[in-house]
Image: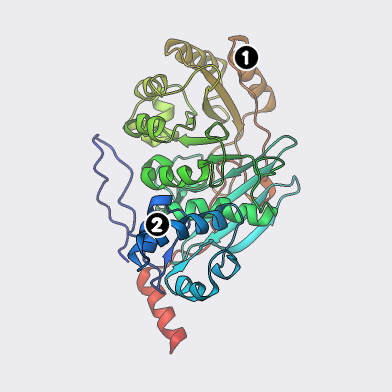
Amino acid sequence: MQTVSAAPMPIPGHIDPVPVARAITPRADGRVDLVGLSKTELREALAAAGLEPKQAKLRAKQIWHWIYNRGATDFSVMTDIAKAQHPWLTERFVIGRPQVVEAQVSSDGTRKWLLRSDDGQDFEMVFIPDADRGTLCVSSQVGCTLNCTFCHTGTMKLVRNLTAGEIVGQVMLARDGLGEWPSQPEGRMLTNIVMMGMGEPLYNFENVRDALSVVMDGDGLALSKRRITLSTSGVVPMMARAGAEIGVNLAVSLHAVTKPVRDEIVPLNRKYGIEELLQACADYPGANNARRITFEYVMLKDKNDSDDDARELVRLLRHYKLPAKVNLIPFNPWPGANYECSTPERIRSFSNIVFEAGISAPVRTPRGRDIDAACGQLKTAAERKSRAQMDREAAAAEG
């Protein structure tokens, strides 16, 4: 496995904080993980392994149902597939799940999982239960490189992108933990997904798109696109593609309304400025008053929380005629952070100004703070090891 290169991704602009993600190491056992494959890819994988086309098509349909409707993780439970074929499938394929390293439950019911990939990389996901919904916060990368200064995850280095299977696997794992198999459209605890975990989803576009395609498939996990929200810090060139090819709700990590402040706390602003970002929001396919764009705004004391900031936010949203909702997020502290949370009075004043302009501006109730699961707090505590170090440890274990 290569170490992270310092070479920038081929996206035009004078500043690009994103290095090339490390390549994904194939499974040591050589098996193909079927989770995250499209129906066509699943059929092609079976055919490439030696099944005749008609049988590959039938088996793909059966296996798809067992994976996404029954939650199966082993071929031996697939009763409509001949027992004699189970060992053949097991030898060549796996129905993967991330390994659970640690699971924590907050005093408010929020759950956080520290997960590990097959190649030993750690990432996190969070489930937030409410009275009328249950939202899973899903990660798209191991680490992050956007360096947003208020965000704990942003202090990590990017290791690699998560595969489509690892993204879907988070949803599967959550449903395992919630006991939501067989799949059914009504009565689910897990009703919504937000791509707001570790990483910038639009810097892992293809894998996020392919994963959400499986999640939204009516024969798959069958979550409506209206119940899925993708959050971006403002990767402008990819926003139109996200709207056209994924079509889920859009959330934008805005957090400031002036160039100097946003340059500081969201460095990507130096590449794609506020005006360019808001124009991309105005052009986002499918955005309307029924499907408003959510603007995330973390409240930082004496940084971005003045009445003038609130009035400028209103002006910008009106200028670009944006169907908008503003989520005001009290800053969640973490060790070493250089910011403090705005006072409740200041947050209330900011919210009132935006509300009085006819724009919804609720204050988000912090969830999972006691287990570092709140917004901006996700960061795995696991030690990052070099590939050489892991190889040495593996050789020592074998010897």
Answer above or below: position of 116 versus 379. Answer: below
Q: Which residue is mark 1?
A: 355
Across and down, in percent, residue 384 comes to: 45, 64
- The secondary structure type at the circle numbered 2 is helix
Q: Which residue is mark 2?
A: 43
Which quadrant, please, contains the N terminus?
bottom left
* Disc 1: CA contacts within 10 A as few (<14), some (14-19) or many (>=20): some
Marks 2 and 1: in contact by CB < 8 Å? no
Going by the numbered disc 2, the residue's amino acid type is Arg
Disc 1 marks which amino acid? Phe
Tell me if residue 38 can be seen: no
Occupied quadrant, residue 223: top right
Residue in the foreground of this view, choosing between 340 and 243: 243
Q: Position of residue 290 (x, y in %)?
A: 56, 19
* Relative side of 138 to 20, left or right: right
**Quarter holding residue 148:** top left
Comes first in the chain, label 1 or label 2 = 2
Q: CA distance from mark 1 to mark 2?
A: 51 Å
Disc 1 is placed on an element classified as helix
Q: Nearer the viewer, mark 1 or mark 2?
A: 2
Q: The C terminus is located in which quarter?
A: bottom left
Q: Between 175 and 61, which is closer to the camera in this rendering?
A: 61
Residue furthest to the bottom in view is: 399
**Residue furthest out toward the front:** 54
Does any portion of residue 144 appear in the rendered image?
Answer: yes
Q: Is residue 182 above or below residue 93?
A: above
Residue name at image x 47 percent, y 28 percent: 254
| Residue 367: image tag | none
Residue 368 falls left or right of residue 375: right
Relative depth, front residue between 113 and 206: 206
